[in-house]
Image (tube, coloured by chain):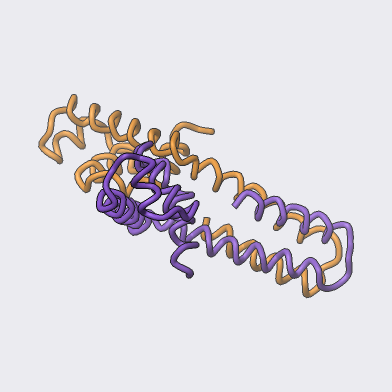
Chain colours: A purple, B orange
Amino acid sequence: MNKLIEQALLYDFYGELLTKHQRQVYEEVVLNDYSISEVAQASGISRQGVSDMVRRCNKILEGYEDKLHLVEKFVHIKEHVNQIRELTHSGAQTEVMRQIEEISTDILEEL
Amino acid sequence: MNKLIEQALLYDFYGELLTKHQRQVYEEVVLNDYSISEVAQASGISRQGVSDMVRRCNKILEGYEDKLHLVEKFVHIKEHVNQIRELTHSGAQTEVMRQIEEISTDILEEL
């Protein structure tokens, strides 16, 4: 998986376990793609401080995934539900198929 | 949801974030239904100590769910996938239906 997508997923699942300050800095650097210098200036900490914080956040988030494997589980389920949705577009378009398509779309929106 | 099922689900999702000692005591009391006295005797801590630890573990696990809502999310997805599987048993039993049924069963086993 692309490193940035992985970071975004980990943050999406476990970000609430970081402190508010960590979340602010992490979002600016990783999700909103501001430079280390910009975030350092805006938040009044050193560039080294920002770098260290992002690295530490990544370690924390990866630590949760190593223990809980919920992102892995979720990615796997998403693939399966995608398969179901694709299958509903093959074969006869019955009312049952339409309902299955609708539910699988709902699940994918929630995931 | 039944309190015991809820505890078991929370433990299933977040149990790895407890210490090994907490997990041992929690499993004996909550999942394996041993009495507080039996667990106290077997683990060499007081009955009060066992009670406190179980209460504390529940608080920790609920605290993770309050922040992450992952059990809630997965329970909801499970309901949806169950609906899909039930739908595959209605209407014509085509090859596509059989495949959807199989995938939904796989997802439910993983959840």
Q: Position of residue A85 (x, y in %)?
A: 73, 64
- Residues A79 and B50: in front is A79
Q: Position of residue A62 (x, y in %)?
A: 34, 57
Based on the displayed image, in which of its 4 quarters is residue A96 positioned? bottom right
From this view, report whether residue B69 is shown above or below residue A76. Answer: above
A62 left or right of B93 in image: left
Residue at 44% from the left image edge and 51% from the top image edge = A11
Whether residue B81 is visible, yes or no, is: no
Based on the displayed image, in which of its 4 quarters is residue A88 positioned? bottom right
From this view, report whether residue B2 is shown above or below residue A61. Answer: above
Residue at 54% from the left image edge and 60% from the top image edge = B109
Residue at 35% from the left image edge and 43% from the top image edge = A22
- Residues A58 and B59: in front is A58
Give the tally of numbered discs.
0
A89 left or right of B37 in image: right
B31 left or right of B21 in image: right
- Residues A57 and A27: in front is A27
Based on the displayed image, in which of its 4 quarters is residue B89 positioned? bottom right
From this view, report whether residue B96 is shown above or below residue B66. Answer: below
- Residues A63 and B46: in front is A63
Residue at 55% from the left image edge and 44% from the top image edge = B73
User: Among all residues in the image, which is located at the extreme left?
Assistant: B44
B71 left or right of B84 in image: left
Q: Position of residue B1 (x, y in %)?
A: 54, 33
Whether residue A56 is visible, yes or no, is: yes
Q: Position of residue B20 (x, y in %)?
A: 22, 48
